[in-house]
Image: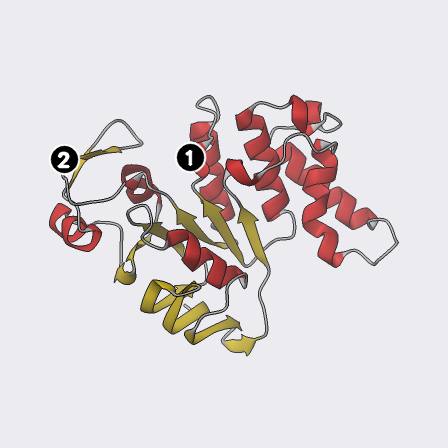
Amino acid sequence: MNKLIELKGVTAGYENKIVLRNISLDVEEKDFLGIIGPNGGGKTTLLKVILGLLPPEQGTIRFFLDGEETEKLKIGYLPQMSNIDRKFPISVHEVVASGLASEKPRFRGYRPEQLQRVDEVIRQMGLEDLRKRSIAELSGGQLQRVLLGRSIVSHPHVLILDEPNSYVDKRFESKFYQLLTEINRESAIILVSHDIGTVLSMVKNIACVNETLHYHSGADVSADWLNEKYACPIELVGHGNLPHRVLKNHEHCSE
């Protein structure tokens, strides 16, 4: 399998504070990588490095397509709900279509094939009846579907999801994870979450970020591995199709 992203020896942070130290990571085509770690461990900083929002202080990040190095990839991004201005006067259709903005000629409308793609994604997200609705009128789960639609409408090589379960509509939860499985047939996915149980039930590989990065091939990880890499004692408890996590008592870990 060809790799899409290569981080080698990356150190990154803000002002005089190092958040990530000497990390290396490969993300391959159609990978489904779960990124876990304690609060403040560097998960969001790692995303910023991959998205090009934070240049590394040391090390390199490289992108590849079909085995050849390329300047950039198409990356879809589903941010945390707290970063969304729900009062902005824009419709469901306009939000989804904005995922194609970089492909639209300046001062021109979308091409017919692009509008067809937008309509297909709106149907895929089950939003047909809401396509003209303002996002201010949507529930959290509906808005999540809109933002997911925006992030995949361009057929990205990589889809990055930052704590998607922080605002998941429980009525849509099972469908949401089913959609991710479908999307993963075409795109690699990087899923960042503090909910370890959900991550382990979904992904193909795991990276634990706690200033450094520890990679685990496969999602069948032991509690001992998690305890060591997290630096906090963790107990996993299965619960239906979507297991949840339970943290044991610990005083030395920041949450």
The percent position of residue 32, horizontal first and vertical second, equals 40, 52
Q: Which mark is residue 248?
A: 2
172 lies above or below 247:
above
Q: Viewer-proximal residue, 40 or 167?
A: 40
224 lies above or below 73:
above
Q: Amino acid at mark 1?
A: Asn
Whether residue 204 can be seen here: yes
Q: Earlier in the sequence, mark 1 or mark 2?
A: 1
Whether residue 2 can be seen here: no
Q: Residue furthest right?
A: 107
Q: Nearer the viewer, mark 1 or mark 2?
A: 2
Rendering quarter of residue 118: top right
How many marks the image carries: the answer is 2
Looking at the image, which residue is at 37% across and 43% down? 193
Looking at the image, which residue is at 59% across and 47% down? 152
Neighbour tally class for label 1: few under 14, some 14-19, many 20 plus, Cα within 10 Å? many
1 lies above or below 101:
below
Looking at the image, which residue is at 71% across and 46% down? 98
Looking at the image, which residue is at 17% across and 51% down? 231
| Left or right side of 101 for 67 | left
The percent position of residue 242, horizontal first and vertical second, equals 31, 32
Element carrying mark 1: helix
